[in-house]
């Protein structure tokens, strides 16, 4: 069930009456590339783990990309009118508080899992920076510093700038593409900025888990981002099979997250949830057992689905992307 609709008792009652059963032959929207279909993400994940060693075969689909080419993971895009009504022309949310509201939505979801909110009140930006840098997961989690160093350095730069400028909006001077109605901020900086916003609201352990999650998302984008973008743009050519030349950055050994803005950063969402994330957490077996939010189990990967969805709402609210994800992981 979509978390945003959970506040309506009558709607919840109707959904409960209409809950799908295991023997329901309809609405089996979670489909494995081998042909098996399921009612929920958790069931699909269990099948992938048991039958395919957690590697999703070509053609594996979540509900929101059922009509797309296999394994593409493209999020459902909002209509142009919806984009215009939700945002002003300068890249700011018209409500002013919408980014904070999306973060609160994420925190509310985490509340359903446990006590993960920060109880300490930071008195200034210096204390916030100290918290974010001191508890950032580094060589005690990752074997290679290159996996996390980029995000860490950007986190330090952003918090240094915040301390220097104090009340100034860190996004105020970010370039904005008026034609696409999107910020030009590169993905790596977007991910670091997200941690500056959500990190101080989380307790130490939850912040560490969220930072690891974001580092994994960056790694997945750097691995699959260019191909996902090429596939998406090829689809937009309406059957024109002419090869698109967008790989100049790859030839120059530039990582996707360092040179691309957020326009295409949600395209890898399905690949991230179905394959990349489970295998990544399995590589952290010695510490994963202590994680409370994320992990390689079906239940914790379901948490990752919801967090990714709320993350997409935050990206959309700040005009980093013109898309939002619409995942469903339960049977109603």
Image: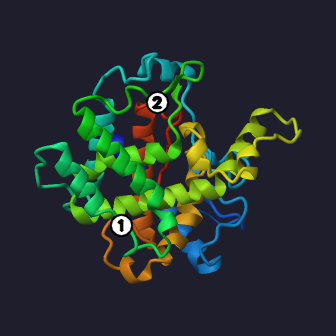
Relative to the observer, which residue lies in front, 137 or 284? 137
| Residue that mark 1 sits on | 137
In the displayed structure, 53 sits above or below 71; it is below
The image quadrant that residue 68 belongs to is top right
Whether residue 40 is visible to the viewer of this picture, yes or no, is no
Q: Do the residues labelled 1 and 2 touch (CB within 8 Å)?
A: no
Side of 316 relative to 96 (left or right): right
Closer mark to the observer between disc 1 and disc 2: 1
Q: Residue furthest front?
A: 164
Residue at 17% x, 51% y is 127
**Secondary element type, mark 2:** loop
- Percent across and percent down for residue 315 are 44, 38
**Secondary element type, mark 1:** loop
In the displayed structure, 70 sits above or below 239; it is below
Side of 240 relative to 258 (left or right): right
| Residue that mark 2 sits on | 319
Looking at the image, is mark 1 or mark 2 earlier in the sequence? 1
- Percent across and percent down for residue 203 are 21, 60
Whether residue 235 is visible to the viewer of this picture, yes or no, is yes
In the displayed structure, 194 sits above or below 140; it is above
Relative to the observer, which residue lies in front, 260 or 236? 260
Residue at 71% x, 58% y is 59
Q: How crowded is mark 1: few (under 14 residues within 10 Å), some or many (20 or more)?
A: many
């Amino acid at each position: 069930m979509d978390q945003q609709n959970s506040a309506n008792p009558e709607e919840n009652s109707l959904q409960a009456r209409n809950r799908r059963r295991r023997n329901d032959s309809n609405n089996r929207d979670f489909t494995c590339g081998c042909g098996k279909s399921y009612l929920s993400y958790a069931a699909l994940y269990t099948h992938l783990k048991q039958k395919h060693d957690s590697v999703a075969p070509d053609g594996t689909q979540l509900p929101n990309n059922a009509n797309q080419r296999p394994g593409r993971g493209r999020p459902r895009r909002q209509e142009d009118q919806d984009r215009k009504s939700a945002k002003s022309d300068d890249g700011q949310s018209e409500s002013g508080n919408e980014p904070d509201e999306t973060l609160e939505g994420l925190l509310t979801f985490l509340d359903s899992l446990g006590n993960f909110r920060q109880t300490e009140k930071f008195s200034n930006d210096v204390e916030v920076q100290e918290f974010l840098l001191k508890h950032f997961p580094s060589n005690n989690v990752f074997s290679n510093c290159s996996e996390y160093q980029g995000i860490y350095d950007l986190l330090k730069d952003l918090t240094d700038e915040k301390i220097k400028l104090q009340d100034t909006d860190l996004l105020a001077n970010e370039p904005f593409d008026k034609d696409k109605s999107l910020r030009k901020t590169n993905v790596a900086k977007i991910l670091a900025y997200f941690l500056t916003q959500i990190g101080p609201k989380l307790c130490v352990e939850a912040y560490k888990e969220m930072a690891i999650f974001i580092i994994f998302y960056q790694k997945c984008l750097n691995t699959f981002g260019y191909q996902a973008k090429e596939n998406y743009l090829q689809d937009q050519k309406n059957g024109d099979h002419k090869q698109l030349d967008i790989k100049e950055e790859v030839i120059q050994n530039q990582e996707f997250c360092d040179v691309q803005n957020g326009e295409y950063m949600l395209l890898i969402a399905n690949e991230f949830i179905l394959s990349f994330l489970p295998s990544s957490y399995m590589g952290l077996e010695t510490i994963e057992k202590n994680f409370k939010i994320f992990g390689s189990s079906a239940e914790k990967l379901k948490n990752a689905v919801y967090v990714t969805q709320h993350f997409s709402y935050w990206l959309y609210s700040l005009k980093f992307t013109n898309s939002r994800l619409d995942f469903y992981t339960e049977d109603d």
